């Protein structure tokens, strides 16, 4: 699986959009981009995933660049409860192992 | 919304004792996984399980560990003789196909 690079930490004001970047320059054509988050020591929570196209669900939007070498997770209106560690994971469809890195610690401030 | 559940939420055991961590995956899921997270470290893959057998395991998953699906709903992780370094959060996950994995809340294991 391709390796990902994320900033170790970010801050965001409550109510504003949080844009979390991820670099995955060695991504292969059959690899998806997944985003999970972990609040304190709770179980990782699935947010969104995509292959090539931008995706949106009730939690977030995922923007993948045309060359697929980077992506951005957007939380449109961050709340204090969005404070968490966010993980960007690149994974082939049939790979059993979700390889979590260190992620980005997002702190939403009032 | 269906979710993965795990019991117990906390387990304290003495070194050398056997522990069994239990998970109830989402009901129509076919793929099951265990991960662990040592305090302050990354979430690490241990094992995946499909069609009643291990499909993949990491080098962490040595002979001390075993997994089982004893009935139609439970999925268990057994650590045969616990060591101090087994202290960690253990997360179970499940997926319907080899795609999105949904995680449980975890079991915090403390080995004394």
Image (tube, coloured by chain):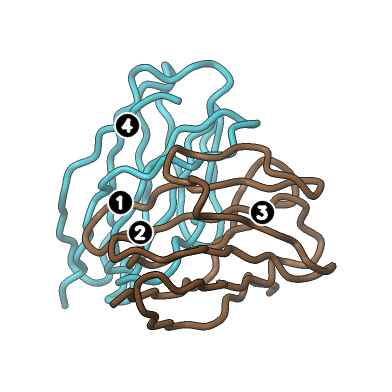
Q: Are marks 2 and 4 in contact (CB under 8 Å)?
A: no
Q: Is residue A89 left or right of residue A79?
A: right
Q: Which residue is mark 4?
A: A4
Q: Nearer the viewer, mark 2 or mark 4?
A: 2
Q: Is residue B11 above or below residue B89?
A: below
Local crowd size for mark 3, using a 10 Å CA cut-off: few (<14), some (14–19), many (≥20) = many
* Residues at discs 4 and 1 both on one chain: no
Q: Is residue A27 above or below residue B32?
A: above
Q: Is residue A58 above or below residue A91?
A: below
In the rendered image, which quarter contains the N terminus of chain A? top left
Q: Are marks 2 and 1 in contact (CB under 8 Å)?
A: yes
Secondary structure type for disc 2: strand
Which label is found at residue B42?
1
Q: Which residue is mark 3?
A: B32
Secondary structure type for disc 3: strand
- The hue in which chain B appears in the rendered picture of the protein: brown
Q: CA distance from mark 3 to mark 2?
A: 17 Å
- The hue in which chain A appears in the rendered picture of the protein: cyan
Q: Nearer the viewer, residue A43 or A37?
A: A43
Coordinates of residue A34 in the picture (x, y in percent): 48, 42
Q: Quadrant of residue B28?
A: bottom right
Local crowd size for mark 1, using a 10 Å CA cut-off: few (<14), some (14–19), many (≥20) = some
Q: Quadrant of residue A65?
A: top left
């Amino acid at each position: 699986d391709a390796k990902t690079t994320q900033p170790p930490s970010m801050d965001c004001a409550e109510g504003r959009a949080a844009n979390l970047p991820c670099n995955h320059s060695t991504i292969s054509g059959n690899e998806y981009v997944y985003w999970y988050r972990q609040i304190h020591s709770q179980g990782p929570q699935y947010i969104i995933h995509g292959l090539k196209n931008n995706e949106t669900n009730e939690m977030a939007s995922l923007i993948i660049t045309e060359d697929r070498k980077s992506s951005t997770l957007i939380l449109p209106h961050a709340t204090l409860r969005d404070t968490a560690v966010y993980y960007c994971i690149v994974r082939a469809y049939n790979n059993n192992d979700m390889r979590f890195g260190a992620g980005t610690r997002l702190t939403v401030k009032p | 919304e269906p979710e993965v559940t795990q019991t117990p939420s906390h387990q304290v055991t003495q070194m050398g004792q056997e522990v069994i961590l239990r998970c109830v995956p989402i009901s129509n899921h076919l793929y099951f996984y265990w991960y662990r997270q040592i305090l302050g470290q990354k979430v690490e893959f241990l094992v995946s399980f499909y069609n009643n057998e291990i499909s993949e395991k990491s080098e962490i998953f040595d002979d001390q560990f075993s997994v089982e699906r004893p009935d139609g709903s439970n999925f268990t992780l057994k650590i045969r003789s616990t060591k101090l370094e087994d202290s960690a959060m253990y997360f179970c996950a499940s997926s319907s196909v080899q795609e999105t994995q949904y995680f449980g809340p975890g079991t915090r294991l403390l080995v004394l």
